[in-house]
Image (spheres, helix red, strand yellow):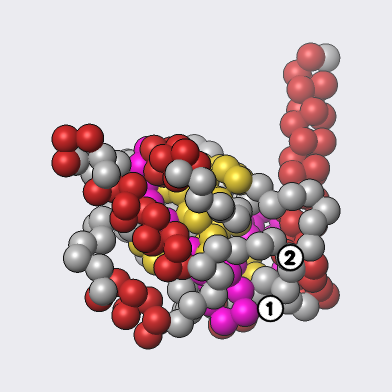
Amino acid sequence: MREILGRRRRLRFRRKARAARQDAAVAFAVEWDWPVLPGVGLKEPARTAKSSSGDGPVCACPDPGCVVPGAHPFDPGLLAATTDERMIRWWWTRRPDAPIVLATGGRAPCAVSLPAVAGTRALRALDAAGMRFGPVVATPTRWSILVAPYGLERLGELLYAKDSVPSSLRFHGEGGYLLLPPSTAGTGQVRWERAPLAGSARPWLPDVEAVVDALVEASTAAPGGGSRLAY
């Protein structure tokens, strides 16, 4: 009897999680005008499958050595990202466990990401300095600070003007992508470290230059000449 009740609870939880994922994808697209599409996801059984090298879950894409299992677009490809509610509901009705992929750039947010441990230290330092943040997406391995859209030319000029930029930073701009909550990929759950205000209009996003300036300053200001943003 306990086993039957346990299965029922797990099924109810899974249904709620699937519904929440579809609702979130629709909200991103319709309320905030962020183009999204379903990520490739993981092969079944998603939580126990091991790659050929035995070091993690297996991506559902054809590449047996995929380094970002479940965390990228495949079919459909990134160019299919849309804000059309009917298309999004159709996708997630067919693939309710698919992660939510944001196509960055254009009218959508871009992002600056850094290792999770460094992200914890950096946000603490920037909070102390009075830096204002928008949403921050977290996975067990990396944190991503969402920023206002920027072009590759502007990013190049910004980075060129710096004496040094921490090598741990990654930039998700035009033609890039990012997983949004509530998704699951090979590295684990995707969540909000700094969530948009509930029921708010399209979230405010900081300028990429302000974020990079603050991160570079936080890095170079570490005691002993080290970097707060190192891996």
Q: Nearer the viewer, residue 160 or 69?
A: 160
Q: Position of residue 70 (x, y in %)?
A: 50, 56
Of the two numbered discs 1 and 2 in the rendering, the one whose residue sits closer to the viewer: 2
Which quadrant of the view contains residue 155? Answer: bottom left
Q: Quadrant of the C terminus?
A: top left
Residue type, mark 2 in image = Arg
Residue at 29%, 72% (x, y): give it: 159
Between the residue at mark 1 and the residue at mark 2, the CA separation in whole angstroms equals: 16 Å
Q: Secondary structure at mark 2?
A: loop
Q: Position of residue 56 (x, y in %)?
A: 39, 43
Residue 184 visible from this viewpoint:
no
Examine the structure image and report whether residue 62 is included in the region drawn in magenta: no
Residue at 49%, 77% (x, y): give it: 150
Examine the structure image and report whether residue 98 is included in the region drawn in magenta: yes
Residue at 26%, 56% (x, y): give it: 166
> Which contiguous range is marked in magenta?
91-118
Circle 2 residues within 10 Å: few <14, some 14–19, many ≥20: few
Eyeballing the image, is 158 above or below 223?
A: below
Q: Which residue is mark 2?
A: 202
